[in-house]
Image (cartoon, helix red, strand yellow):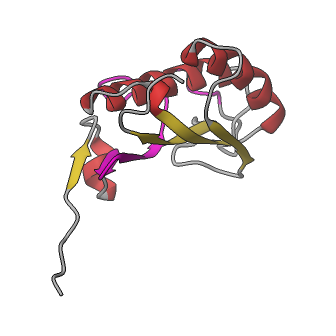
């Protein structure tokens, strides 16, 4: 009996917290791509549309939800492209959000825009959480894609 290790192909975005926390942004094993939680940052690791914070360091409102969700999808598309894939290959996504009502409203609009259809062909979860990695961050999205799945 042989113990074959599965080959992994990894991808990063080159942001500081990858090294600081010690993780990769995406891992391909066989025909599946597993993506770490994606944030709304630019190429330099600066958060796009950071939410304003109150005196206790909590988000003041969630008016930046749409912009943060949109940039998060842009980052996911960048990672998928490193594998030669697109959002058409995504089979599951999970949105972790600080405010479910604003995320539901913003997400329903942005998801349709990003996937290019009224009902994106992937399973989707929307989960309310109490905090995320950065105080100004109000959304984080994980993705799972199957290589070569493409549009159905």
Q: What's the magenta bit mostly, secondary-structure-wise?
A: loop
| Residue depicted at x 34% and y 57% | 21
Question: Relative to the observer, which residue lies in front, 91 or 61?
Answer: 91
| Residue depicted at x 24% and y 36% | 14
| Residue depicted at x 61% and y 34% | 122
Q: Quadrant of residue 138?
A: top right
Q: For this view, does 47 lie left or right of residue 127?
A: left
Question: The N terminus is located in which quarter?
Answer: bottom left
User: Is residue 143 shown in magenta?
Assistant: no
User: Is residue 45 shown in magenta?
Assistant: yes
| Vertical placement of residue 36 versus 4, above or below | above
Image: magenta residue range = 25-52
Q: For this view, does 7 lie left or right of residue 58?
A: left
Image location (x, y in percent) of residue 128: 75, 47
Image location (x, y in percent) of residue 151: 50, 22
Image location (x, y in percent) of residue 108: 73, 22
Question: Relative to the observer, which residue lies in front, 5 or 133?
Answer: 5
Judge whether residue 115 can be spotted in this image.
yes
Judge whether residue 41 can be spotted in this image.
no
Question: Relative to the observer, which residue lies in front, 115 or 35?
Answer: 115
Q: Residue furthest right?
A: 101
Q: Quadrant of residue 152?
A: top right
């Amino acid at each position: 009996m042989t113990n074959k290790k599965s080959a992994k192909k990894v991808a990063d975005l080159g942001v500081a917290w990858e090294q600081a926390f010690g993780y990769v942004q995406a891992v391909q094993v066989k025909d599946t791509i597993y993506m770490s939680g994606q944030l709304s940052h630019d190429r330099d690791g600066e958060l796009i549309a950071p939410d304003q914070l109150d005196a206790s360091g909590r988000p003041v409102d969630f008016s930046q939800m749409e912009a943060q969700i949109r940039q998060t999808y842009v980052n996911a598309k960048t990672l998928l492209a490193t594998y030669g894939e697109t959002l058409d290959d995504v089979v599951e996504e999970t949105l972790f959000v600080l405010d479910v009502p604003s995320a539901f409203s913003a997400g329903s609009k942005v998801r349709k825009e990003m996937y290019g259809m009224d009902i994106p062909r992937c399973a989707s979860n929307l989960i309310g959480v109490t905090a995320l990695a950065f105080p100004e961050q109000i959304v984080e999205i994980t993705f799972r894609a199957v290589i070569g799945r493409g549009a159905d």
